[in-house]
């Protein structure tokens, strides 16, 4: 099923995982997938080469999610450093695995600044990749968006124009970079509306359970840390158990507020930690039930996203 159809019965709760490192076997992720599938997500997305994880495993893992667990899979795909043939080869493999959904991304420049990477890059921006996929195939296409602006783009208006062009090239839905202040998301949504970007937007939420990890990620992506969350990090940063409890509660509170405000979806960056995802999802089970019941009342012919 195409993920854009799921958003018709919003909100969609989705989960993101990353493949094992290239040197690790794919089996090391199977328990994680099994545990996450129990949470009955609308879809599970699989990253592609993010944070040093393997690109080679993405298609296989997405295939396992889709074909073994019968859960919709979203395969991430980046274009930086790839030729047209590389991209077409991955798209072919995705089709062979019955994957219908792709998150089309540019990707980050390699940390070592390898110039070869840019030389062989055929599609410079995600919009170019989206246009290519749309032209060649019937994939449902997601794209990334940034409530605080993309870190490389110093001009927010230009950044929004670039996002609009991703929508015009054929993106079907958006997923945000992680954020810790919901008001940033709400004002971003207003800007999208003003700019004429009329796509479902899933809010990317990351439960923070490790201080070093969050410092590294926010440095990389530029997400800001509001005072309320900074106090949690400062107070419990050196106590893993306390930070885990407070970080999980903070993410849950964000999610409840987003769902109450009518968000189209929540995309949980699970960091391959099913136990944290389970804790959060269990805290919103009655809220999910509430939306399911509403759907049944409004249109009994709709296919529910949640059981
Ligand atoms: P783009 O949309 O191409 O934007 C990149 C920059 O170029 C922006 O500053 C934009 O303003 C600018 N720009 C865009 N179009 C133009 C244009 N026509 N002219 C001039 N400037 C332009 N990375 C991975 O490597 N693997 C993953 O699996 C992965 N998953 C992600 C999932 C999500 C939900 C998100 C939010 C990010 C993910 N990333 C992943 C990180 C992503 O690759 C980086 O944020 C990357 O720097 C930008 O990717 P993009 O697709 O948003 O790029």
Image (cartoon, rainbow, N blue to C red):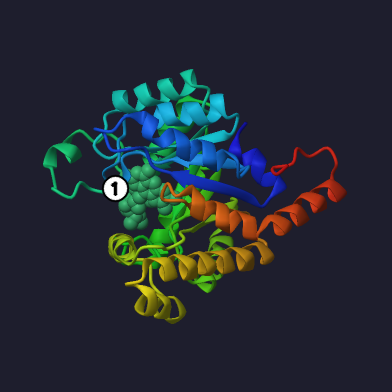
Q: Position of residue 125 (x, y in %)?
A: 33, 44
Q: Identify the image quadrant of the N terminus.
A: top right
Asked whether mark 1 lies closer than 8 Å to ligand 1, one says: yes
Q: Nearer the viewer, residue 110 or 46?
A: 46
User: Which quadrant holds residue 229?
Assistant: bottom left
Q: Quadrant of the C terminus?
A: top right
254 up-or-down from 80: above or below: below
Taking 14 as reference, is 153 left or right? left
Left or right: where does residue 125 sit relative to residue 249?
left
Instruction: Evaluate whether residue 17 shows in this view.
Output: yes
Vertical order, 90 against 144 (above or below) = above
Q: Give the percent coordinates (x, y) of residue 78.
A: 34, 39
Q: Position of residue 83 (x, y in %)?
A: 26, 29
Residue at far top of view: 96
Which residue, given by chain and number where applicable, does mark 1 sit on? 51
Q: Secondary structure at mark 1?
A: helix
Closer to the camera in the image, 117 or 207 = 207
Residue 106 in the image: above or below residue 139: below
Q: Residue at x 57, y 64 (%)?
A: 252
């Amino acid at each position: 099923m195409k993920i854009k159809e799921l958003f018709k019965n919003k909100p969609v709760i989705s989960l993101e995982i990353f493949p094992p490192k290239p040197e690790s076997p794919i089996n090391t992720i199977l328990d994680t997938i099994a545990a996450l599938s129990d949470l009955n997500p609308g879809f599970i997305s699989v990253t592609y080469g993010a944070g040093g994880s393997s690109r080679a495993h993405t298609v296989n893992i997405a295939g396992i999610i889709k074909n073994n667990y019968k859960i919709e899979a979203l395969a991430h795909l980046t274009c930086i450093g790839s030729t047209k043939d590389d991209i077409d080869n991955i798209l072919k493999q995705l089709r062979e695995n019955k994957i219908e959904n792709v998150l089309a991304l540019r990707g980050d420049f390699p940390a070592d600044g390898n110039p070869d990477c840019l030389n062989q890059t055929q599609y410079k921006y995600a919009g170019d990749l989206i246009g290519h996929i749309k032209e060649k195939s019937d994939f449902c296409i997601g794209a990334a968006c940034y409530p605080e602006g993309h870190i490389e783009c110093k001009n927010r208006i230009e950044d929004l124009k670039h996002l609009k062009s991703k929508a015009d090239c054929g993106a079907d839905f958006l997923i945000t970079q992680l954020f810790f202040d919901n008001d940033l998301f709400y004002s971003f949504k207003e800007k999208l509306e003003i700019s004429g970007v009329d796509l479902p937007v899933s809010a990317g939420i990351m439960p923070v359970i490790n201080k070093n990890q969050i410092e590294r990620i926010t440095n990389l992506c530029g997400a800001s840390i509001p005072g309320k969350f900074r106090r949690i990090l400062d107070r419990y940063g050196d106590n893993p158990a306390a930070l885990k409890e407070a970080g999980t509660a903070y993410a849950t509170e964000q999610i409840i507020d987003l769902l109450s405000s009518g968000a189209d979806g929540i995309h949980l960056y699970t960091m391959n930690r099913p136990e944290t995802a389970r804790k959060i999802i269990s805290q919103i089970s009655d809220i999910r039930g509430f939306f399911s019941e509403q759907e049944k009342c409004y249109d009994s012919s709709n296919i529910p996203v949640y059981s």
